[in-house]
Amino acid sequence: MFLKLATRIEMLKQDRGEGPIPHIIMIALISAGAVILAAGILQVATGWVNKIPK
């Protein structure tokens, strides 16, 4: 009985693949979000620095 249960649990633990969204697409989306965030921060910082009198 224990061997049957262990076999079934082991089958469930096997690699299930990448899932509904492949890893490369997730990495691309996270990278695009990081680039957009960095561009926004750079734009705000540039505007803020340009307000400083020379």
Image (cartoon, rainbow, N blue to C red):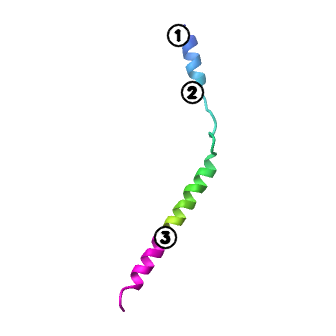
- Discs 3/2, front: 3
The image quarter in which residue 50 lies: bottom left
Look at label 1 and name its amino acid. Phe
Query: Where does residue 41 sit, x and y in percent of width and height?
Result: 45, 70
Pick the front one: 39 or 15 = 39
At x 49% / y 65%, what residue is drawn?
37
Query: Where does residue 43 sit, x and y in percent of width and height?
Result: 48, 75
> Which residues are drawn in magenta?
40-54
Which of the labelled discs sits on residue 13, or is there none? 2
Label whose residue precedes the other's in the sequence (1 or 2): 1
Q: Is residue 30 above or below residue 20?
A: below
- 3D distance between C-alphas at marks 3 and 1: 58 Å
* Mark 1 surroundings within 10 Å by alpha-carbon count, few (fewer than 14), some (14 through 19), many (20 or more): few
Seen in the image, is 34 located left or right of residue 20? left
Residue that badge 1 annotates: 2
At x 55% / y 14%, what residue is drawn?
5
Query: Where does residue 15 sit, x and y in percent of width and height?
Result: 61, 32
At x 58% / y 53%, what residue is drawn?
27
Query: Does the magenta stretch mainly form a helix, a strand or a loop?
Result: helix
The image quarter in which residue 9 lies: top right
Report the quarter where the C terminus lies. Answer: bottom left
Which of the labelled discs sits on residue 26, or is there none? none
Look at label 3 and name its amino acid. Gly
Q: Is residue 7 above or below residue 47?
A: above
Q: What residue occupies the far left of the structure in this picture? A: 53
Look at label 2 and name its amino acid. Lys
Q: Secondary structure at mark 1?
A: helix
Residue that badge 3 annotates: 40
Q: What residue occupies the far bottom of the structure in this picture? A: 54
